[in-house]
Amino acid sequence: MLKTQLFDYRYVPARILHAPEKVMVVLHGLGDSLKGFTWLPEALDVDDVSYLMVNAPDTYYDGYSWYDFLEDPHPGVLRSRKLLLSLIEELIAQGVPPGNLFLFGFSQGCLMAIDAGLRTPHVLGGICGVSGYMHLAEEYPAELSPVAKQQEFLLTHGTSDPVVPYPSSKAQYQQLKKLGVPLNLLTYDKDHTMLPQEVKDIAGWLRLRLSKTT
């Protein structure tokens, strides 16, 4: 059983548990909590993946936040980045190979998944971000980790998203792609939510990435 001392968390073991374990870390959006994604394992329907769902560090009304988006987000992003990079190390220390580790994030969680994925020194199994954007995109390529161009990103977005407008996120993602970061962007006719077809596409991506793990 995987655990962490860094976050409040819920661990959902794979239906078919292998050693070494394959794990997806799930990062929720603003004002939500890990409870908001308890549906994800069943929806993705991938037998041999465990899930570690975590709560962001800051309280926000009835949920949690990864950073303060109303004032200065930078201190919160740096703090949450440090925690997530430490979480990756913590899971590796528990026997999960980096290539068996996946990050999934929605909205604020997407920003943090991208941020950690671009800066971790380990090549992960994959990073999936939904309805998000990047913080300090202008810092790249200087702040890319030595293995950032070996990571595999799947990013999804709604073309009518009123919370995180698609055009600005698309421009950031295109910048990453021009820098040589492997990135697949899927768009949907949706707002700030997730669609059944989108979940199916993410599940297909996950199965493909799993087929390449050791």
Image (cartoon, rainbow, N blue to C red):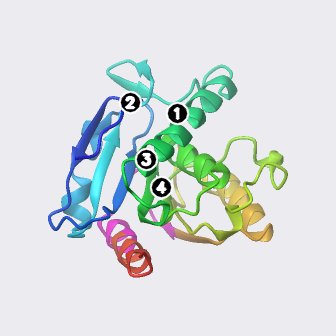
In percent of the image, x 41 and y 76: which residue is there?
214
In percent of the image, x 43 and y 54: which residue is there?
104
Task: Choose the circle earlier in sequence order: 1 or 4.
Answer: 1
Q: Residues within 10 Å of mark 1 (few under 14, many from 20)?
A: some
Q: Which residue is mark 1?
A: 83
Are the two marked residues, 2 and 1, in contact with CB atoms closer than 8 angstroms? yes
Q: CA distance from mark 1 to mark 3?
A: 15 Å
Q: The residue tagged with tag 2: helix, strand or loop?
A: loop
Q: Is residue 87 magenta?
A: no
Where on the picture, by quarter, is residue 2?
Answer: top left
Q: Position of residue 159 (x, y in %)?
A: 54, 61
Q: CA distance from mark 4 to mark 3?
A: 28 Å
Q: Is residue 67 above or below residue 149?
A: above
Q: Amino acid at mark 4?
A: Val
Q: Is residue 147 above or below residue 205?
A: above
Bounds of the magenta span?
A: 187-202
Q: Nearer the viewer, residue 198 or 118?
A: 118
Where on the picture, by quarter, is residue 29?
Answer: top left
Q: Is residue 200 magenta?
A: yes
Q: Which residue is mark 4?
A: 130
Q: CA distance from mark 2 to mark 4?
A: 21 Å
Q: The residue tagged with tag 1: helix, strand or loop?
A: helix
Q: Which residue is mark 3?
A: 93
